[in-house]
Image (tube, grey):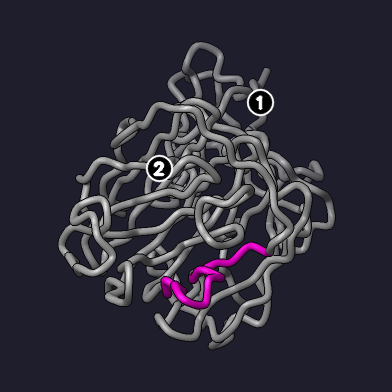
Amino acid sequence: MKNIYLIQLIILFSYSAMAQTTYPSGVTGCIARWTFDSADQPFLSSLPDMSGNNNNGTPYSIATAPGFRNKPFKAGAFDGSTSWAEVADKAMLSCNEITIISLVKLNSFNNALCESSQIVSKGYPDFIPGNYGQCLSDNPYDGTCGTFSPNYTQLVSQVGSPVLTVPPGNFVSLNKWYFYASVIGANLVSHYQIEMDSNIKSPSLSPVNSISGTFSIGSNSQNLSIGKHLNPNYPYWVDGSMDELILFNRALSNSEIYSIYSYLWGWATPVNGIEEKGNEVNLTCINHNLLISTSNQKINKVRIYDISGRVIFECDSKFEQIDLNNISSEILIA
């Protein structure tokens, strides 16, 4: 009798009309997600919210660019002076806690007054109720808006109140993709940062710094901006590329942050629910290739189904390698 192991692949299509509040790696509380993918066009004509919550953005002069894996049309290119996007205010975008995650590569550091590159921001000016954001800045290092210290630019977050004092360190380089996470909780703000090396996956993640205190984001009715600040006196333009930007309405844990990093690094992330029967079926994802191997001679068939129950792959050998690019741009093994 054949032993058949069923591995379910949930395929997430960009045109899905169903609201999705769980990120593909299994993390709940996702209120907005922008992937900057395009359909082979030189500029983004739209910026859909892939979470299904309809926090769609209006892009302005955002060109298309290769993403983290160097696949074309998978990122948005910001030119540092005219490229940005705006998302209309919604009640769900005002949160008591928030986690901001982004995948960004800078071409140059902004040398305009206060020397910051604003990845995302909700409302202006900073430090008003409802304001939150994530940016790259040299201000923690030199402590002034009038000195440009490009070699000392680092991840910084904004929170409604009080002013967040981030310790200097963990400076970033140009022309490199980085995974950034800003976790803003009621009593703790933590920053995560790691270079996205396409050949080496980090075995773990931990905060590069954490700031204790009493933090209150509050709420406002202003729109959310991507790639610049809405403050006309301090626009903080971004010159670089974005491959992913995600908002969660809570403070995520270390393991949840790592699961999102893993998903972005390799697309497929194994999570609980795969029946392996004592490790007889082994799954590994390396550079978008899913490796399937079996250690039990009696196991001679593995089938992979999509969410509708359709068989999309079947193998009879003890070892098989599947190119995930041929299945979907986004998959979750569940």
Q: Residue 21, how many percent across, how many down?
A: 72, 42
User: Residue 136 sits in which quadrant?
Assistant: bottom left
Residue closer to the observer: 46 or 303:
46
Q: Residue 88, how many percent across, how many down?
A: 73, 65
Q: What is the tally of numbered marks visible in this picture?
A: 2
Q: Residue 170, how many percent across, how many down?
A: 22, 46
- Give amino acid for label 2: Leu
User: Is residue 9 something one can see in this rendering?
Assistant: no
Dot 1 and dot 2 residues touching (CB under 8 Å) = no
Tag 1 secondary structure: strand
- The circle drawn on residue 224 is none
Q: State the CA–CA distance, disc 1 to disc 2.
A: 55 Å
Residue closer to the observer: 47 or 92:
92
- Give amino acid for label 1: Ile
N-terminal of the pair, mark 1 or mark 2, is 1
Q: Is residue 226 magenta?
A: yes
* Apparent side of residue 76 relative to residue 220 in the rendered image (left or right): left
User: Residue 114 sits in which quadrant?
Assistant: bottom left
In this figure, which residue is indicated by the disc labeled 2?
164
Question: What secondary structure predominates along the stretch shown in magenta?
Answer: loop
Furthest-top residue in this view: 278
Q: Residues within 10 Å of mark 1 (few under 14, many from 20)?
A: few
Q: Is residue 166 magenta?
A: no
In this figure, which residue is indicated by the disc labeled 1?
4
Residue closer to the observer: 58 or 313:
58
The stretch of residues the image draws in magenta is 223-237
* Apparent side of residue 205 relative to residue 331 in the rendered image (left or right): left
Please state, as top left, top right, bottom left or bottom right, where the N terminus lies in the image.
top right
| Residue found at x 28% / y 51% | 195
